[in-house]
Image (cartoon, grey):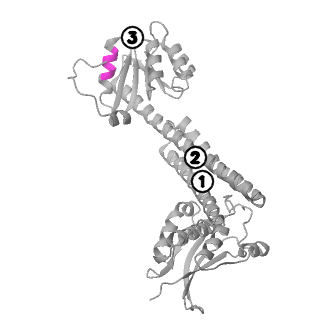
Amino acid sequence: MSRDADPPSSPPPAAARTRAQRVLVVDDDPANLRLVEAYLADLDVEVSTALSGEQGVEQAREEPPHLVLLDIMLPGIDGLEACRRIRAAPRTRDVPVIFMTALSDHARKLEGFGVGGVDYVTKPLDRPELLARVRTHLRIQKMHASLQRRNLELSEMARTLESRTQELASASSSKNLLLAVMAHDLMGPFTPILGFSELLRDSAETLPRTEIRELGGGIHLAAQHCVELLQNLLDWARLEQMQVVNHPRATSLFELVSIGCAQVSLRAEQKKIALRNDIDPSAEVHADERLVAAVLRNLLVNAIKFTRAGGSVQIAQEQLAAGNDGVAMLAVSVIDDGVGIDGDTLVLLNQGQPLPSTEGTERERGTGLGLSICHQIVGLIGGSLCFDSSPGHGTTATFTLPLMRS
């Protein structure tokens, strides 16, 4: 319903209509509808109106709004019944409903919360109060919708991963145990994602902004962990099927290490671990930067995982003498002061064997594939990888890369 004072205008472009949030206003008094429309003109929202509960329910089902302003006292089905029907329909069950009611209707207000209402505004309507409540619930609704989309994306990622895992498992019985370990570890990051997003959905309007930021950071870190695990699985699958091709070229090692440190910086900051890039800014290697980046990512993640809070991780280099082929090599070391590795595990690690996943110093999980992937990639690019460690004395992972010839 248009406001009488508004001049006729052409409809906004389709893209603009899609972006704007929609508010459905249900009231049997046309004057009240015009008043609410006039108040909501200050917000970037589309407003549709209905004169009865039946009409409001029908409009909500045809084109679900982002928020409903619903009068309680309506002819036919009243606002309470209209709210029940809106919240019962699958397409509109998450749409927030704000009741409009007289100040004296205390019992009706309580009943409104019981049928699914999230808030109420009192009549006669106060413009600042109405706008404040509408803004708040539209913001919460937008956050909730965003979290739902993210959860759907993560669920789709999990389904894709499960499908790929099944394909790989059928290829070789020797891989079944390894894939079972991965499936177990890959479920871990979804627990904080689902838990934090549920808390945001249910309590966002009462949580302080600092706590919302912390929850958002937790979701981001868990999602990043999912992506890393998936990337390792895909890298491993490609390596096993010999689909990884080495395309070496002149590459700045300092830049690759800087990017790798930036990618794991949030993980390091959470444990207050210092990252130190001691690579010579002028150092150039003859290597495929994608493959070197994958090795660095896995070695840095592993070092942070097994380093206690307040520790440090250093990336250093050492030039080696040229071999019989005349190619000079550069040794790159990722050095941590973490918990170290026992002798038996160290032997398997230096053989490039996939290891069962082990919890980090703060119960971090992984697939156990990362270091095996590093061995395969380093071999593909013409280098070698070895680990030096003892329990309680940290670990040094060193891999070699061909230097660019002058």
Q: Marks 3 and 2: in contact by CB < 8 Å?
A: no
Residue indicated by mark 3: 28
Query: Residue at the spot x=47%, y=17% of the render?
Result: 57
Between circles 2 and 3, the one closer to the viewer is 2
Residue 375 horizontal/vertical position (percent): 65, 73
What's under tag 2, amino acid-wise? Leu
SS type, badge 3: loop
Q: Which residue is mark 1?
A: 226
Q: Which residue corresponds to mark 2?
A: 154
Q: Is residue 7 above or below residue 353?
A: above
Q: Secondary structure at mark 2?
A: helix
Magenta segment: does it hold 34?
Answer: yes
Q: Residue at x 73, y 70 (%)?
A: 353
Q: Is residue 281 above or below residue 20?
A: below
Gap in Å between the C-alphas at discs 2 and 3?
43 Å
Q: Does dot 1 land on a helix, a strand or a loop? A: helix
Image mark count = 3
From where the camera sits, is residue 224 visible?
A: yes
> From mark 1 to mark 3, how far is it between C-alphas?
51 Å
Calculate the distance from the C-alpha at mark 1 to the C-alpha at mark 2.
8 Å
User: Quick check: 153 left or right of 302?
Assistant: left
Residue 123 lies in quadrant: top left
> Mark 1–mark 2 contact, CB under 8 Å?
yes
Tell me which segment is drawn in magenta. 32-37
Q: Is residue 307 visible?
A: no
